[in-house]
Image: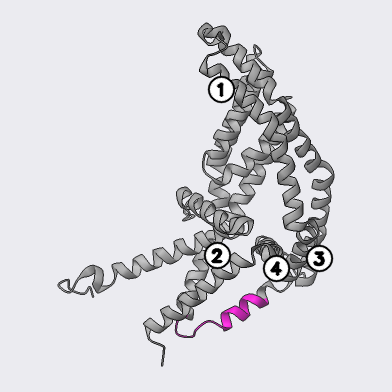
Amino acid sequence: MALPVKDQLKYWGVATVIFFVVLWFLGDVILPFVLGAAIAYLLDPIADKFEAAGLSRGMATGIITLFGILGFVILALLVVPTLVSQTGGLIQTAPEMVSNLQNFLTERFPELGDANSTVRRSLASIAETIQSRGGELLNTVLASFSGIVNVVVLFVIAPVVAVYLLYDWDNMVARIDALLPRDHAPTIRSLAGQIDNTLAAFVRGQGTVCLILGIYYAVALMLVGLNFGLVIGFVAGLLTFIPYVGAVVGGLLAVGLALFQFWGDWVWIVVVYAIFQSGQFVEGNLLTPKLVGSSVGLHPVWLLFALSAFGALFGFVGLLVAVPVAAALGVILRFVIAQYEGSRLYRGLSEQDEP
């Protein structure tokens, strides 16, 4: 005989509270394990394709691990140092760019030439703040990242956890399925399948879109000779998962820098603008329809709220689990609404049951 609904809600509520309490207290400790699980989840479809081609799960995991090590070495030796160097250079040159903007505005709006004007004082204050705080912020972020997260834990334990989980992924899923409550197993499987589809479309698909656009923006901007093109491409690609935000932020940064660097040479400014326009066109008409799909189920506002709330409550671990939790809550909420719309609470007692 199944437990009453009231008791089931009590037990599942207690389990949910325990989950969030553990996440609160063990955030930094479980970080490499959460990150390893996320990596394994992202790579599982690739391992499945290798298995479908006739390879064993162990060989598939070994091949993926080998390519992962090669990619990490390339990033560590080539991309990351350049990215850090350009970010520092961008911070150091900020006062010069603000000064150029000030001169530009003064030429066209002479009333701003007054040293006591509010706009001029604001620009000077922005330049000083960026220069004094920007480098300090960059160093603090790097130092705290190394100190709090612990480089050894993050770059050794997380990949090891990912390899083990990737190897045993199918067995773990089967074991979890065997532990589901028998009365609710079909419903839970259906909801889990919808959550997986949402995550696969958003995390895997949108992650691929972010990677492709980030590489395109960075390479294209560096080819046209725009200073700090790698940084702008990285930022634009990283923010692409939020519709329009990546293109708007990256486009404003790129066009703004192009105005200072290529002032008077309008062809290159138009080229920089065209790079982001073409990126938006390719994303909207080719990449997103093919890789993400039209019905992901994660509204941008809901996604931003989840990232903000979980990031504020649980730190970096919260940012990692925000998207999966948001996807799960979205699927569960749609299920609850569907149950509500089919219930007497919604339809009332006077409405005749449909055959």
Residue shown at the point (61%, 21%) measured from the top left: 124
Gap in Å between the C-alphas at discs 2 and 1? 49 Å
- Lateral position of residue 321 relative to residue 296, left or right: right
The magenta segment is 171-184
Relative side of 62 to 248, left or right: right
- Amino acid type, residue under disc 3 in the picture: Gly
- Provide the residue designation for mark 2: 196
SS assignment at label 2: helix
Instruction: Check disc 3 and report the residue beneath it.
Output: 62
CA gap between label 1 and label 3 equals 56 Å
Please state, as top left, top right, bottom left or bottom right, where the N terminus lies in the image: bottom left
Residue 86 shows up from this direction: yes
Residue 136, by quadrant, is top right
Horizontal arrangement in the rendering, residue 314 relative to residue 79 (left or right): left
**Color scheme of the displayed model:** one colour
Mark 4 surroundings within 10 Å by alpha-carbon count, few (fewer than 14), some (14 through 19), many (20 or more): few
Which badge, 1 or 4, comes first in the chain's sequence?
4
Q: Is residue 226 magenta?
A: no
